[in-house]
Image: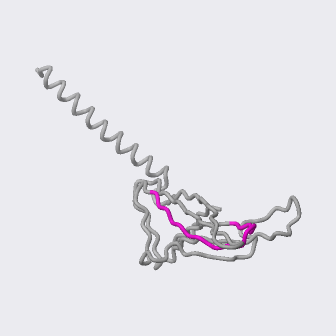
Amino acid sequence: MKTSFEKADFVLRLLTFAAIVIGGGWTAYQYKQTGSADWAINMRLETEILPYRDDLRLLVVHVRSKNPRNYVFELNRDSKDSFELRFHKISSDLKANVILDEENGQLIGKADLMQGTGGGYAFLPNAEMDDMRYIVLPINTVVEITAEMQIHNGDAGACT
């Protein structure tokens, strides 16, 4: 006949096995739900206008990007990945209630945010990056700013 110690040991082993199976199942479920091969980068733009000289102003743009996933996400120029910042001038003679599409104005500047990275850009897990670029503009110029990241499978994530 088994002792109460042996019974308790058996129950604890069963509970440990059940915890491992349930934990593994939950991990697999979360992995599938969050997109095992998908990527997600959260981007936001922050701008600041500074005096430059005469009737010119310095528009400083911070592209803040965060990798919310728990694995490293990489952009690689050899795989045709890109990370760009574009500036479009919005016409000053538009009438009221005119609706514009993205990047409808004249392209006045473009910056490759992967320039100087050696052809690659790595986003560590839960890390936030801050890429800063600036452009000199005449006073009272209205611009649309777009930051776009594109990976080799053709998916694009943009922040305007």
Residue reaching furthest to the bottom = 78
145 inside magenta stretch: no
Which of the 4 image quarters holds residue 8? top left
| Residue drawn at x 44%, y 77% as measured from the top left | 119
| Residue drawn at x 40%, y 56% as measured from the top left | 125
| Residue drawn at x 43%, y 51% as measured from the top left | 31
Which image quadrant: the N terminus? Answer: top left
139 inside magenta stretch: yes
The prevailing secondary structure element of the residues shown in magenta is strand
Q: Position of residue 25 (x, y in %)?
A: 38, 44
Which image quadrant: the C terminus? Answer: bottom right
Residue 80 vs 47, above or below: the answer is: below
Q: Position of residue 76 (x, y in %)?
A: 45, 74
Of 150 and 109, which appears nearest the observer? 109
| Residue drawn at x 66%, y 66% as measured from the top left | 145
Q: For the magenta stretch, what is the residue range?
A: 128-144
Of 21 and 113, which appears nearest the observer? 113
Residue 17 vs 6, above or below: the answer is: below
